Amino acid sequence: MYPHLLQSPEIFLGWDFYLPLIGMVVFILLGVRIWVVLGLGSLAMLLSTDVMPPSLLGEALFDGVDSFALIAVPLFILTGDIMVRTGLSNKLLDIAEATMGWQRSGLGTSTVLGCGFFACISGSDAADAAAISRITIERLVKQGYPKAYACALVAAGSCTGILIPPSIAYIIIGLILGISASTLFLAAIIPGVLILLSVMAANFITNRMYDYENSRAGFRLGYWWKTVYEGRYALLIPFVILGGIYSGIFTPTESAAVAVVVTFGIGFAQKTISLKDIPKMLESSTKVNGVIVPIIAMSLPLAQTLASLDVPQYFVHNMISLTNNNFLIMLLMLLILIIAGCVMETTPNIVILAPLLLPLSLKIGMNEIHFCIFMVTALGIGFITPPLGLNLFVVSGVAGTPVLAISRFAVPFVIAMLFVVILLMLVPELSLWLL
């Protein structure tokens, strides 16, 4: 597959390429919006290299967003927003607490599991962090956790928002690389669960070291059944989304649309929302979508320009020339993704780096699905690492706790997630077994 990307031709890139590239880096450091930087960079490269006519920019903008798969993005975000406003997200957290609350670190573990439940609906880590932090942080503090640690725990658990299907990140990387989102969703199940378990394990170990929480309540089957029954409508939503996708009844986009209708139906039936709430929910979803879609639109002409200049082949050739050790190359890829995740959001990282790193991964024998899982999971760590650390800023805004204080407590979770990423990198069967 992709035989043209596996060649190693002699390629020369001059200042007509590097000057626009340097300009893009400078603009990013100055804080210019990513979609503006991508658009200006694409136009500058087209004008300086003459590799393709500048009219390509306008065509690619519309062709890029004219995708059925992209419709799923605002729909999953809207579903998550409806879950919060109807109180169904609280029901999911109640089920998580009834399931895991009997452990010594019960409330902390339940919070992480609740993040995983919500990730099965929203597909967005930021939405996950915002929703869960409003509900759980004060409860965690009352249980004995330091507030900054409680914030770090929610921020780390919310990383599963892009790692557990349905995930907006997998929709985007599938669109960019031409891979089925349904296939990526299936492949991401085990890696997503492993990340969830790693955050739970890090919390358990930290809790044992500092004795933040000492829950002693036993598991009560009757109470668990009662909680599950009361939250049955909340559980219906992830069942509709994932069951519809994996059974082949729905595509991811159709599944997202059905989830919106079902969630609205539950909210109206239980009278937890009304018609006057709809404009606010649509506005909230539109704002998030308005950040993602322009980045995708502007990235596609840039990707086409880079491909026409043979930049992916050039990148592969130079990386291979550094070392012929596949393990070291994978570590270099991991380092690139970790650094990129620290300074830039997932969407621009995917649209910029995926076309460059995919040919390199194929060159060293990685499967394209394995590469996508590895890349998205590695980028997921960036949500709890400064200076960007989007989840850190989200929970900081909700809880009023300084980001630096939260990031200090996030270190154990970064280490735990990094361990899983390395495991996924070295054991491709973890990503491919369900396929």
Image: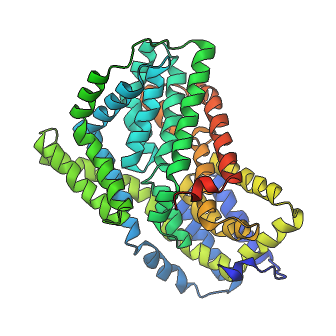
Of 40 and 81, the residue lying toward us: 81
Q: Which quadrant would residue 202 be assigned to in this image?
A: top right
361 above or below 391? below
Which of 55/280 is in front? 280
Q: Position of residue 23 (x, y in %)?
A: 69, 64
Is residue 382 among the parts visible in the rendering?
A: yes
Q: Is residue 429 left or right of residue 91?
A: right
Q: Position of residue 153 (x, y in %)?
A: 52, 29
Q: How many discs mark residues in the rendered view?
A: 0
At a point 33% along the width and 31% down the height, the residue shown is 95
Question: Can the viewer see residue 285 in this picture?
Answer: no
Quarter of the figure that contains the N terminus: bottom right
Seen at 58% across and 56% down, the residue is: 431
Query: Which of the 4 image quarters holds residue 429?
Result: bottom right
Q: Position of residue 365 (x, y in %)?
A: 73, 67
Residue 412 coordinates in the image, percent (x, y): 64, 29
Indicate left or right for 430 with 18 as reference: left
Name the residue: 67% across, 76% down. 306
Identified at 66% across, 63% down, the residue is 24
Which residue occupies the foreground of this view, 306 or 163? 163
